[in-house]
Amino acid sequence: MSLQNLFPLFGFTLLLAACQTDSPPLLSPGMAINQSMTFQADTLLARSGSLSQPVLTIEGDGITVDFGGALLIGSANDSLPDSFSGLAIRVRNSKNITLRNLNARGYQMAILAENCDSLTIEHSNLSYNYRPALPAQGGKAWPEKAAAVYLYNCQAPALQHLTVTGGQHGLLLEDCHNGQLSDNDIRFNSGIGIGLQQSSNNHIRHNLLDWNVGAPLSAGILLSGPSHGNTLAYNSATHNQQGIALTGSCSRNIIYGNDCSFALGSGIALNGQEHIAAANQLHNCQYGITGDSTAQSLLAANSFQNCGTGIALRSAQGNTLRYNTFQEGGTGVQLDGCREEHLQHNRFTAVQYPLSAGLCSGLAINDDNLFWGFEVLLSAPAPNEGLVLVKNRIGPGSLGQAAPFARSNPRIKSLAGTLEAEQWRAMEEDGYRPAPLPGRPPFHLAPPLRSGQAFILTGKWGPYDFRRPIAVLRDTADGQFTFLLLAPNGNWRLTGGEGFSRVTPKTGTFPVTLTAQPQQGAEQQRLAFEFIGEGIVNEYGQALKKGAYVTFGWASPPGEK
């Protein structure tokens, strides 16, 4: 999507002249800023009818704009998020611009920058901008609708310490190179946390990118090709549809030391060639790592635990899998129609089916792979040519279709004396380990929240963010309804309802599971509750202070019994 000719001149602008004042100036809609400014903290309702009519325009070289914590509001409080329109800040044709301490909400886009060199955006909250009602339809290879920040044709951008929640997409970069994106908190949005298209040599490190889920195109990080030579390291990208996804003809990207656990789809989805995916944590995912037509890539020292499938490659060629650890789960490595794949020094413990391969050629399973606690070592739903299974350590269990190929594989009776996962990982990480930023933990972990796919809860406007009370129907088995009540710290009580003869319990603290016995023949089931406790933030970003009484509830859809 080209944005170069998208924006006509805003009909009314106010040029700022240098002047001496006793206090910083206030923001005013229509400003065209061409020099460094520091504004007073203020709240300004400043509507923008379209992306071609920004509230503020910034253009020039060597400009620092400190918004002083000012809040720009683009829509009235009673507006729905899918009706938000317009643009808060436009930056264009500039060099060495710094924006900081801005709050902007209620717009289609908060910040749009085009044709800029060395743009810095930092320490700003750009939450609760446009998002569609779910379930959203479609899902293109690259989103065009809205984002908190959208950069086009920008060189060496720096985006840091930004907060984006309650929106659709966080940070989207198109044709941007040599950027630094770090220490951002982009969680609980319905689309993409950070997205790159046709963007290369960027570093995305130490970001919180959890719970970005709901729309057909949703992920913690999305790279859309051709995007080459990017480094994605030390990010927390859990509880997403996909943690990190590469699409199109991407190459030579490093994906290192990220936590992509609890993905509904793939923790990491690869496409393209010559990638390195190493030392990532992929626990409780449907698929840990998937690769479609992935070639000449290294998957090393990753930790898979309790995944439906650890690594699944299709139509792949020439990839190396080594020093990965697989614990529990259904299938360890699944290969379909692959050629010249190499498995070395991997560890499979309590995985039901460590290996599955069909229509593969030149598959080499050799050099000290360890298999323990399995049911069937190799399932081969279709023939494989040239399969080699040698010099591995194998515990008790059936070799399955591996039996004709197995030779020189010593059987072991216990795991005593085998290398621990940390030692296996240390063997492989030093050669390509990206440098972490100073003083950062291995993973940029979010504050404690409930973990697990069962807590990925989406409503009309996106994922539940644990900042308000909700009631969730969990089960209707055995003739009774089972509900889960979640909220910040506080107390709740049942205040009303219909269609149920008994509800247990009727008051308590959070979290709690309660049961309700439905009445036969009831046209509608409904429960109403009241919460009092910590301050909350509702799904529209409106805050209520500690001690406020908040109502919430559950109702069956009309027509359902």
Image (cartoon, rainbow, N blue to C red):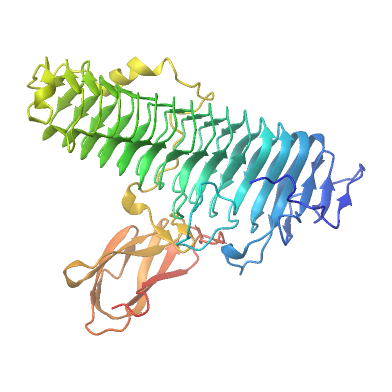
365 on left or right of 440: left
Q: Name the residue located 12 percent from the left edge and 21 percent from the top edge.
A: 406
Height in image: 275 above or below 512?
Answer: above
Residue located at (58% from left, 66% from top): 80
Q: Which residue is drawn at 18% across and 33% down?
A: 383
Q: Which residue: 62% across, 28% down?
A: 178
User: Where, by quadrant of the figure, is residue 120 drawn?
Assistant: top right
Q: In this view, does 196 lie to the left or right of 300?
A: right
Percent of width and height locating residue 136: 48, 60
Please state if 256 lies on the left or on the right of 262 as rendered: right
> Residue 496 occupies which quadrant of the picture?
bottom left
Q: What x and y, as percent, mark residue 133?
A: 50, 63
Position of residue 398 measured from the top left corner of the image (x, y, whole percent): 7, 31
Residue 523 visible in the picture? yes
Choose between 278 and 336: the one closer to the eye: 336
Q: Relative to the observer, which residue lies in front, 24 or 403? A: 403
